[in-house]
Every structure is written in C-alpha cells, then in structure tokens.
Image: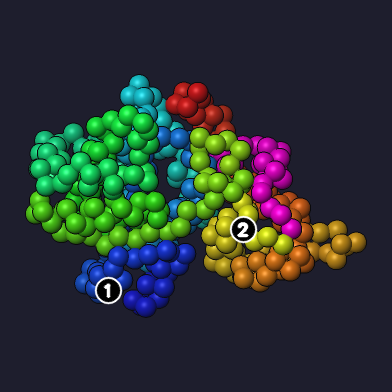
C-alpha cells in the first residue's frame, strides 16, 4: 500500500485532519507510526463504539501501531465513582477486543493501555503541574466543555482532564491522537500547550459522532438511544423498531449507523447490503454503496420497517462474539455498572 492509498484509508469517514500535510509527512518519514484514542471508562460500551473500532482497524491496515487508552483516572475526573473504576476497567478490557473480532480485524499491532499504569509516574505528575502553570482556568474549561460533565457547580477535576489528555500523547509515545469531533477543543488544546512544556505537537484526527436511535446523541445514559453490546436478538429488534425513522426522511437514527458501520464493512468484504422483503412487496433490495441506499430511502422506495429489520439483523451479527461470552461479560457489567 503506497502513501496515497494509506492516506485515503486513514481519511475514510473522517471529519477533519489537523493537519493533512503533517500526516503525509509522518507517513513519509516513519515506517510504522503510532496512534491512540482514549476512552474514559464511564458508561457501558454500546454499538456507537463500532465506528471507532472500524477507524482503528483502518489505522492498523494503514500500517500504524494502535493504542487504546482505557482511561480509568479520566473516568474518575468525569464523575465515575472511584470504587468502581477497576470493575469498569475489567469490563472494557474484556469487551473491546471482541468488538475487533466482530469486524474481523487483525489486531497484531493493537495494544490496550490502562491510564493509571503510567499516570502515577512522578515525571507525568510533574508535567501535569508544569502545564497547569501555562494554561488558565478558562482555557481548561473551554477545552473540556463538550466532553466533561461540569454541571452547575463544576469540580476542579474537570479542569485537570484536558491537561492529562494532552500529556498522554507524550507518555504513550504516539505520533497522532484520534477522537470524535466532540474532542476537537481538547485536541487543539494539546497542540497549543504541549510545546510549552517541551514536547512536540501531534497530528490530530476526528470522526463524526453518530446519533442515537431516537435522534439524540447515542449515550449509555439514555437507554432508548442505544443498543448495548450484551442485548439479546429480540431486544435489539425491539429497540431498532422504535428508532426515529420516518418514511422518506433521511435525518433519522438509523442511516448514520448504516453509513459508517454497515456499508463500510460491506465495502471491505465486497458484499452488498441486502434488504430482505417479501416478494409481494417487490422482493429483496441490494445496495453496493450508501448513496444508493439513502436515495432509495428518500424516494420512499425503501420502507422504514424493511430498513429496521435489516439493520437489526446486521447488528445482531456484530454482537455474536459478545453473546458467546455473555455469561462472563454480564457478570463484569453488573459488577461495574449496576
């Protein structure tokens, strides 16, 4: 795979790269660059994590070393009780590799890192203090505003969050950080402030957030907005059938998942997305790209119920690795999230 092909793969389904020139330079100068994404172990992972897993798989295919930071301390900074941190970490550690298995990714160059495994280092802590002398309270609050739950009486911990996330880039020894568009302010905070304490700025890359089933952000705190990784087949079908999906209206809770997950997987496997329909309604429909499907839906050639049934089928296929480990995962989930 040449640099152009690697660039195209890295930029697939991406909202922004800062900067593309720096990314291209990185690919030219370094044989195996590294990238990381951090996830604070707050809520239970759900199907909204699949676009992230697919993007990490793209980095792996493009020759990157990929690190997934399971950010236990960041979870505490964002109001996760300290006494459940280890239990939630154990669940994330077990379930995240199964998501890669679900999409058929090769994870030989993938690594999970526990945040507290290096964030207790005295040099790391010194760097946190050092950066705190260069940034203002307003800088930190603005950077974390779309990520941290500040509430009416903000805690100091939320202001420490973006400082630590910035310094993580150095201590994880990565060339690039990846996050959702909601992370943009923190990623820019890192680029601006790492050089102030003697470290290089990194390439930052962002992907869109997919909405929940009911049209809001897919969130573990809004049960009806998401499908949990441990949901049974009948529960998945029930939730998907309740999704916001009006006939002819492409602004709904299903099409983004189709675009960023289902059609991406179908393209990679050179398969069509099949909408199963009774012959009396015209028989099955097959789509080879997302634009064709969206057009058919907008023109009311594809009924919402047919789309829902097919999406539920694909989700249940993705959840099979988790279902095989249901007993173990369910116990870990109850310990950490009950």
Q: Position of residue 10 (x, y in %)?
A: 39, 67
Secondary structure of the residue carrying numbered label 2: loop
Does the magenta segment cover residue 228? yes
Residue 108 in sight from this viewpoint: no
Crowd class of label 2 (few under 14; some 14 to 19; many from 20; radius 10 Å): some
Q: Residue, x 87% and y 62% (percent of image)?
A: 281
Magenta range is 226-247
Give above or below for 179 relative to 112. Answer: below
Q: Residue 215 bears which disc, if any?
A: none
Residue on which disc 2 sits: 251
**Picture quadrant where residue 116 is located:** top left
Q: Residue 21 bears which disc, if any?
A: 1
The colour scheme is rainbow
Q: Position of residue 173 (x, y in %)?
A: 21, 53
Image quadrant where one finds the N terminus: bottom left
Q: How many marks?
A: 2
């Amino acid at each position: 795979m040449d640099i152009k092909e690697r660039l195209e793969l890295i930029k697939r389904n991406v909202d922004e790269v800062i900067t593309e020139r720096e990314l291209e330079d990185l690919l030219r100068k370094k044989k195996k660059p590294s990238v990381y994404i951090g996830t604070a172990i707050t809520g239970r992972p759900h199907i909204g994590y699949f676009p992230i897993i697919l993007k990490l798989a793209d980095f792996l295919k493009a020759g990157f070393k990929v690190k997934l930071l399971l950010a236990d301390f960041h979870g505490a900074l964002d109001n996760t009780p300290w006494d459940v941190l280890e239990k939630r970490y154990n669940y994330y550690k077990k379930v995240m590799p199964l998501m890669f298995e679900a999409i058929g990714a090769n994870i030989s160059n993938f690594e999970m890192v526990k945040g507290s495994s290096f964030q207790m280092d005295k040099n790391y802590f010194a760097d946190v203090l050092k950066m705190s002398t260069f940034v203002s309270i307003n800088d930190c609050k603005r950077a974390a505003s779309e990520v941290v739950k500040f509430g009416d009486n903000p805690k100091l911990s939320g202001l420490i969050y973006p400082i630590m996330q910035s310094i993580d880039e150095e201590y994880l020894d990565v060339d690039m950080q990846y996050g959702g568009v909601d992370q943009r302010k923190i990623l820019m905070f890192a680029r601006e402030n790492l050089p102030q304490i003697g470290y290089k700025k990194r390439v930052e890359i962002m992907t869109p957030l997919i909405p929940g089933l009911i049209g809001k952000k897919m969130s573990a705190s809004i049960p009806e907005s998401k499908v949990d990784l441990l949901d049974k087949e009948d529960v998945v079908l029930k939730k998907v059938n309740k999704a916001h999906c009006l006939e002819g209206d492409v602004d709904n809770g299903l099409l983004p998942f189709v675009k960023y997950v289902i059609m991406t997987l179908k393209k990679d496997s050179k398969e069509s997305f099949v909408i199963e329909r009774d012959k009396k309604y015209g028989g099955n429909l097959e789509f080879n790209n997302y634009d064709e499907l969206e057009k058919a839906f907008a023109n009311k050639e594809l009924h919402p119920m047919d789309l829902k049934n097919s999406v539920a089928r694909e989700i249940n296929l993705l959840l099979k690795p988790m279902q095989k480990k249901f007993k173990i995962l369910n116990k870990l989930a109850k310990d950490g999230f009950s």
